[in-house]
Amino acid sequence: MLRIITQWVEAQAELRRICDRTHDELVVHKEATVREVLQAVKRKGDKAVLHYTAEFDRMTLNAEELRVSGAELDAAYQQVSKELLNAIRTACKQVEAFHRQRVPKSWVQFGDDEVVLGKRYTAVDRAGIYIPGGQASYPSSVIMNAVPAKVAKVPRLVMCTPPGQEKKMNPAVLVAAQEAGVDEIYRVGGAQAIAALAYGTETIPKVDLITGPGNIYVTLAKKLVYGTVGIDSLAGPSEVLIIADGKANPVHVAADMLAQAEHDSMASAILLTADSVLARKVVAEVERQLANHPRRTLTEKAIVNYGLVVVVDSLKTAAELSNEFAPEHLELQVADPWALLPQIRHAGAIFLGYSTPEAVGDYLAGPNHTLPTSGAPRYASPLCVETFMKHSSLIEYSPTALKKVAKAINVLAEAEGLPSHADSVRLRTENQGDAEF
Ligand SMILES: NC(=O)c1ccc[n+]([C@@H]2O[C@H](COP(=O)([O-])OP(=O)(O)OC[C@H]3O[C@@H](n4cnc5c(N)ncnc54)[C@H](O)[C@@H]3O)[C@@H](O)[C@H]2O)c1
Ligand SMILES: N[C@H](CO)Cc1c[nH]c[nH+]1
Ligand SMILES: [Zn+2]
C-alpha cells in the first residue's frame, strides 16, 4: 500500500505530484466552492455564514448563537480533567517562553548631519486566528496561534473554529483559548470563517490579519482573501518527510509517518533512506500499525495517495530530494543529524535525532506548529510573534543633510520623469549654496 521507489527520476516526479497536491487540477472545483462562499459572505454577512454552516457542518444556528457565550466558557473548565488543564498550561508556558526569545524591537540609528533612520514595530489592531476542527480538535493550535499574538500585544484577538457536534464545542479548545488570552470566539469553520474574518459580518468583526492552519478549503480561502487582509502562510494539510539511516527504528519511523497521515486524507508522509532493509520494514510496520488504527479510513487514504518511500543512494541525495520537496516537517533520524543539517535548505521545522518525534513540536517543545506546507517552506517561515506585527521605516533629515543629497535626488527624479519629486527637495534647499553628492 505504501509504495517504494528506487529510481531518481520517478522519485522526483512523485515528490512533485505530492508537493503540488493542494494546487493541482483536483482542487479546481474546491476553489470554485470557496470563491462562491467568499462572495456570498461578503454580500450577505451572517446570513451566508449560517447557510454554509448548515450545509458544510450540518449545524443549524441563529446569529445569536455564533459567538460562544461566557457561560459556555466557564462551563468548559468543569469539563476538562486536572491533567489536561495542567498539560494546556505547560504547553502555554513553553510556547510563550520560546516566542518571547525574539520579540521584534524598534530601533533607530543616528548618522552624520543629524540623520536618523530606523524601524518602528507595532502589532496589528485585530487578528483572527483560525483553529481547525473538522476531522480533529486542536487545543494545541489555539495555543500556537494565540500565545504569539498576545506576546505581540495584539489588542483584539478573535478566534473562529467549526461548531462541533450538537452545538457542543470541544471544552479543551475553549479552555486553551481562555488560558492563551483569546478575546472572543465564534463557532464558524471552513471558508465561511475566513470570509467572515476578512470582510466582517453583523456579528463577526473584520480583522487585519488571519493566521492558523486548516484543510484545503480554509487554505484556499486564506489565499484568496490575501490583500483584503494579511495572512500568516499557507498552512494546509500536514506533511512529514523523514530522512533515516539504517540505525533508525522502523517502528518509530512508521509511527511518525502515521502521526501526520492521521490529520487529513490530503496529508502526506514520506521516507527517504539509503537502507533498503529499513525501507521494507517501515512499509510492513505502517501496515501493521494501520490495521487497528482508530482513524484508519482517513489515514489509509493519505498513505495510499500521498505516502511514499524512496530508496536513495546516499544521505546527500536524500537532502537534495528533501530540498526540492521543501517539507512542512523534516525529521533527520540519522546518527549525526547536525552533520547533515548544513545540506538542508528548505523545511518548516527540522527535528533532529532518533528521539525527537515530530509530535513533540506539535504540542509543547516551544517553536510554533503552524507551518507552511505544499512547497511553501521554500519562501515562508513558521508562525511567530513577528507575524502579528509590521514595521514602519523611520527617516529624519536635517536641512544640512538634505542639502547634501539634493543633487543626487534631482538627477534620479529627472531620470524617472517626476519633476515634483525634484521640486520637493529643490524648494527646501535652493539658495543655500551648492549641493554636494
Ligand atoms: N500546516 C499546519 O501548520 C497545520 C497544523 C494543524 C493542522 N493542520 C491541518 O489542518 C487541517 C484540519 O482539517 P480539518 O478538516 O480537521 O478541519 P478544518 O477546520 O480545517 O476544516 C473543517 C471545515 O471545512 C469545511 N468543509 C468540509 N468539507 C467541505 C466541503 N465539501 N465543502 C466546503 N467546505 C467544507 C467545513 O466548513 C468545516 O468546518 C488538516 O489538513 C491538518 O493536516 C495543519
Ligand atoms: N502536525 C500538525 C501540523 O501539521 C499540528 C498538530 C496539532 N496537533 C497535532 N498536530
Ligand atoms: Zn500533528
Image (spheres, rainbow, N blue to C red):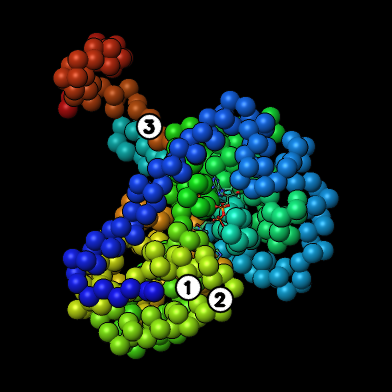
| Residue 395 image offset from top left, x and y in percent | 38, 32
**Residue drawn at (57%, 69%), measured in percent from left and top?**
295
Q: Earlier in the sequence, mark 1 or mark 3?
A: 1
**Residue drawn at (48%, 61%), measured in percent from left and top?**
265
Residue 258 circle label: 1
Q: Which type of secondary structure does the marked residue at label 2 adopt? A: loop
Disc number lying in front (2 or 3): 2
Can residue 333 be seen from the camera position used here? yes
Amino acid type, residue under disc 3 in the picture: Ile
Q: Does 105 sit left or right of 435 as displayed? A: right
Residue behind mark 2: 293
Disc number lying in front (1 or 3): 1
Circle 3 residues within 10 Å: few <14, some 14–19, many ≥20: few
Q: Earlier in the sequence, mark 1 or mark 2?
A: 1
**Residue drawn at (67%, 37%), measured in percent from left and top?**
50
Q: Earlier in the sequence, mark 2 or mark 3?
A: 2
| Residue 165 image offset from top left, x and y in percent | 71, 55
